[in-house]
Amino acid sequence: MHRKALLFLALLLFLLSHTCQAGDPILLFSRTTPKSRQNVTLTNHNPRLKLTTEGDQFLRSLAPGFAIISIIGPTRTGKSLLMNNLLRAFREAEWQNSTDGGAHPPSGMMEIDIAKDVPFPVGKGVTSKTHGLWIWPTPLDVNGVATYFVDSEGLHGVESVQTQSYEVELFVTACMISSDMYVCLKVCLRTTWSHRLLLYSLYNTWYPVDADDVKNLKSLAGNYFIIISFDEPSHTDHKPLASAFSRLFMIDAAATASSNTDPIPDNLSPPNLHWTVQNFNKHNLIAQKWTAAEFLDQLIRKDTMMEDANVDVRFLKRQFRTLEMVPMARPLDDDAALAGLKGAIRWDEWKGDYAADLSLLLANVTAELRPKQLKSNPISGAVLADLLKSWSDTAPIEIPERTNWDHAVNMKMEHEGTRLLALFDRQASHFLPPDPKNVSYRQFGKTIDDLANATVEVMRNSVSSVGQEPDGSSALALLEKELVRKSAQYVRRYHEWARSHVEWLGDSVNADIVTELGALLDRPEELCKKRRFTSFLEADIDVLVARRIEEGVGAARKFLPTLEESRQLVVKGTYSPDDPTDASPVDIIHGLKRQILLKHKQCPSPLTPIFHALHHILVNYYPVIGVLAGILLLRSAYTNRATLLRAADQAMHAIISYVVPPVLGSYGIYLLTQKFILERSDKELQFLPWKDLELAVEAVGEVVRGSAAVLLTVFGAIGVVWVVGWWRSLWR
């Protein structure tokens, strides 16, 4: 009894709390006319959505730390029923947690009357029951997060009030209230905000799933991208369709001068999308041995109606943080009960497979449930309302209607753009590598620009031929952007080739210089004849090197945009890749120049031939000269015998007195000079000075030391003569 009393008290408190919180759904967004923007339901075309006053007040009442789960899909697919059952599943999970897995709530609590006892009304006919976007104001505590549920108007309704553009806006708005990527479009252009709002958008369809369902989802995402592109018509640098979802909605901040140029941070998370397919026969998957994920992948990839299906696969998978299919079994076999004709339906009356699928969906939705965040902090409802208002004020007023013909034309233009882009690639690739004889940097750039302009002109003619304005064609704008990127890519490839070719020219120039200098170094006889003085030869070598380099730079100038770049590549080109020394051409040329100058300094002096001639005469004709001199001396001596004898006596006396001492002194000084100044060994001593004079002429290094020895000898002789004169003056 005590246990039953506690259970009854807990049940009473639970019912009271939910009774106090219960309320009717609030209309967040309603249909309005494009001009008056009034809160009225339309029966004509071109409706728009607007945040209602009641919806704005409700959002502004939300404190930070809440999450939103929304549902969207075609009309009459049971979206409201699924949302109601999902709420019941949350309640049952909440009840089980409160009772620690004890008894289930009484039957009345878990009964549902499709007509009235549910948060969202469920229609019984073939028309859409829900118009606009509705939010249930009673939050559920899911993992500690206050979670609200949003139901949406069905797509593809039969009331003839929906246009394709309205369906796009409906899908966008439903996602905007739950995801950061949608609401931050214009805000990110003018602020430094980075935010991440949670999306759990359940795209609901009926089994069987076919290519049309996949195309609808692709079309919604693709059309939304087109809406964004119309939002900034002056900006052409849109991200490609296959880029990441967080980048799709970042219209470049540089579009206006007052825009913020900071990029959207990389932590912007794409939304999660759970694709529920009701009335699903799982036995078909079992027979095919597929999982739901594999089945979804096959559906998306095997889209035979679109040639670029692989691009769409990447686009879809990047659109959503997680993209999963959740097969849902048929809720009831009784169609009348399912249509709401037999009153309330108990929770345990749903088919077991359906309840299990609902529990799986519940687990998937709550697995990563987080509150909406702005700058990594929980966002309040007031901030969300401001973001929604910013979107409503700045969104394009006229969203172009995309009929089947428009869709076919756009697909045709997309394929035409792809074909022309491939043709441009094939034609441009023929110019690489170019012919060095017939190409220059400016000529190549002009050729690529002319080819790109011709491609754009073909595309403009194609767009005009299908009745579109070329200036408003997104396919043409995308092609122009891709051509700019590819043209720059081909210019970069040419520039890489040009640098390589100029380096090759530099190698050739440096090799020619090295060859000429090496030939001059290998022929010393010509080297000595070329210039008498080394300084003149050095100037000639510098002129030769400069002339060859300027010739190479002149030949390479046309291949590169700047003269300085050409000069650097020619001078710094690699001379020999196989050279183990890894010496640069400048080092090699400088080394050869130094060797040539050193060898030129070793060339003989112009006076050397005279010394050699005199030496040759003295050595080879010494006897003849001696005989002739003797005859002349004897004749003169015989004639002047007395005088000669007297003169000889005087000469001998003079020689002994004046010559012998200086000669002997000078000779001694010469020997001492060789020993101590020239540091010669005893075997290397020269007893005749002629050899040192010859060596002084032949070697520059020996000239200095030999000259010092000769000078010391001369001054020594003078000193000896002076000493002898001084000595004789003492004895007079």
Image (tube, rainbow, N blue to C red):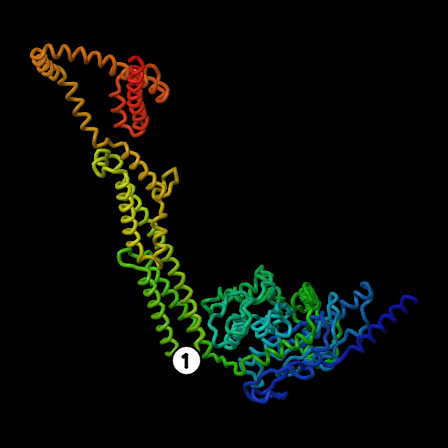
Q: Residue at x 21, y 28 (%)?
A: 608
Q: Tell whether 420 sits left or right of 257.
A: left
Count of numbered badges drawn on the protein? 1
Instruction: For label 1, count other residues whose C-alpha is less than 10 Å away and answer few (under 14), some (14-19) or many (20+).
Output: few
User: For this rendering, which residue is in front, 121 or 353?
Assistant: 121
Q: Secondary structure at mark 1?
A: loop
Q: Amino acid at mark 1?
A: Glu
Q: Residue at x 31, y 56 (%)?
A: 557
User: For this rendering, which residue is in front, 533 or 645?
Assistant: 645
Q: Position of residue 648 (x, y in %)?
A: 16, 12
- Taking the view exactly as shown, the residue that stands out farthest to the right is 1
Q: Residue at x 29, y 37 (%)?
A: 596
- Residue 42 visible in the picture: yes
Per the image, the residue denoted by label 1 is: 469
Q: Is residue 655 above or below residue 241?
A: above
Quarter-wise, where is residue 182 in the image? Answer: bottom right
Q: Tell whether 544 sits left or right of 283.
A: left
- Taking the view exactly as shown, the residue that stands out farthest to the front is 732
